[in-house]
Image (cartoon, grey):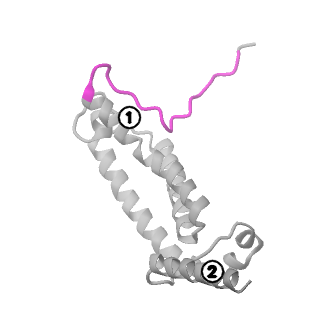
């Protein structure tokens, strides 16, 4: 019996020609969205717990599923040789594929932004008050004009309150 065939996870599998300094640089540049998605959103959730950020990350995941579905459905051949943009230069996409992906990204981003801010926004208070929201301190500060100023004032007020308590003891 033959061993099962293996398939690689290609999320970060980027190739370039050995010795090609521009290709090496562009290979790293092409990984920036992965670093932002994984590191950025995980850090943002851990430290901020913002519903807007959570739904932004969910939108990116949703978009990734749509992109993978389109790639497997269309199955357009990859280019043999190309140059220009990083993914075109590295031979992963044709110029047409880059423009199609850009258009799809703009469209999906606009639709998701509208859905979050016009449909899901009404559920933010429910999510905040849910068991999940209370356990993980999930919050929505999108209604606060200047979050930085608000947090500064709240932290300062709490410090002053604690200082007055310790003086009275």
- Place residue 149 in its image quadrant: bottom left
Circle nearer the N terminus (2, 1):
1
Q: Horizontal and vertical percent for residue 83?
A: 22, 34
Frontmost residue, 45 versus 15: 45
Q: Is residue 135 left or right of residue 105?
A: right
* Magenta extent: 3-21
How far across and down, in percent of the image, does residue 95 sit?
27, 43
Query: Is any part of residue 10 visible from this angle?
Result: yes
Vertical order, 103 against 28 (above or below) = below
Q: Which residue is under mark 1?
A: 77
* Left or right placement of residue 61 versus residue 29 in this view: right
Question: What is the CA distance from the residue labelled 2 to the residue labelled 1?
Answer: 67 Å
Q: Nearer the viewer, mark 2 or mark 1?
A: 2
Q: Inspect the magenta stretch and tell me whether residue 11 lies in it.
A: yes
Q: Main secondary structure of the magenta part?
A: loop
Identify residue for label 2. 163
Residue at x 25% of width, y 31% of height: 22
Q: Please identify the quadrant where the N terminus is shown.
A: top right
Image height of 124 relative to 63, above or below = below
Q: Is residue 92 magenta?
A: no
Q: Is residue 84 above or below residue 118?
A: above
Say which element carries label 2.
Answer: helix
Q: Is residue 58 left or right of residue 88?
A: right
């Amino acid at each position: 019996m033959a061993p099962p065939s293996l398939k690689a996870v290609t999320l970060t599998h980027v190739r370039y020609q050995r010795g090609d300094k521009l290709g090496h640089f562009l290979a790293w540049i092409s990984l920036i969205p992965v670093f932002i998605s994984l590191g950025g959103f995980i850090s943002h959730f851990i430290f901020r717990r913002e519903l807007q950020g959570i739904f932004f990350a969910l939108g990116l995941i949703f978009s990734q599923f749509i992109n993978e579905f389109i790639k497997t459905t269309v199955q357009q051949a990859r280019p043999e040789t190309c140059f220009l943009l990083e993914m075109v230069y590295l031979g992963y996409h044709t110029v047409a594929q880059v423009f199609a992906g850009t258009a799809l990204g703009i469209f999906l981003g606009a639709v998701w932004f509208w859905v979050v801010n016009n449909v899901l926004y009404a559920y933010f208070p429910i999510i905040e008050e849910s068991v999940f929201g209370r356990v993980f301190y999930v919050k929505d500060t999108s209604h606060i004009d200047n979050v930085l100023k608000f947090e500064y004032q709240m932290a300062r007020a709490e410090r002053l309150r604690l200082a007055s308590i310790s003086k009275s003891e």
